[in-house]
Amino acid sequence: MCQANGAYNREQFKPRATRDLEKEKRRLQNIFATGKDPEERKRKTRPGRQQAPAPKQDRFEELVKEIQERKEFLADMEALGQGKQYRGIILAEISQKLREMEDIDRKRSEELRKALATT
């Protein structure tokens, strides 16, 4: 513990990240920018085994998923200490998607009223 010269030496604590935060940050930024995970591209199915195309999804449901993805991205960025940088952008995008959902809802309600009025 104490050496002959009276100096106290202590082992320096060197924290090590359990994962590469810079790599994770770049991955999340790519997901945000492209809407796709670059790791998913590497794991694509082989050309010989094509899956049947999924049925066309409703735009309203797509918007719900997109909003959820934006929320998850913001949570990930906040966990990496980058939330402040993205918060305004993400909240603006979510707001825009909510307005689009309201427009879709308004149009559907109008169509339903017209359909009920004609019967």
Image (cartoon, rainbow, N blue to C red):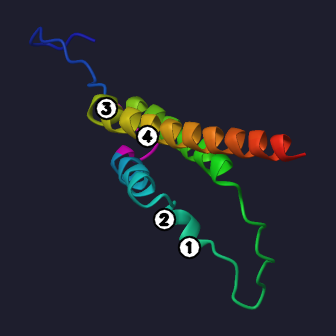
Q: Residue at label 3?
A: 88
- 71 over 37 or under it: above or below: above
Camera-side residue of 6 and 84: 84
Q: Residue at x 82, y 41 (%)?
A: 117
**Which label is found at residue 96?**
4
Q: Secondary structure at mark 4?
A: helix
Is 11 left or right of 60, judged from the image as shown? Answer: left
**Cα distance in 3D space between marks 2 and 4:** 26 Å
Q: Position of residue 10 (x, y in %)?
A: 25, 18
Query: Which disc is residue 42 wearing?
Result: 1
| Residue that mark 2 sits on | 38
First-in-chain label (4 vs 1) = 1
Magenta span dominant secondary structure: loop
Q: Residues within 10 Å of mark 2 (few under 14, many from 20)?
A: few
Q: Residues within 10 Å of mark 4 (few under 14, many from 20)?
A: some
Q: CA distance from mark 1 to mark 2?
A: 7 Å
Please indicate whether residue 17 sits to the left or right of residue 116 in the image.
left
Q: CB of mark 2 within 8 Å of CB of mark 4?
A: no
Element under disc 3: helix
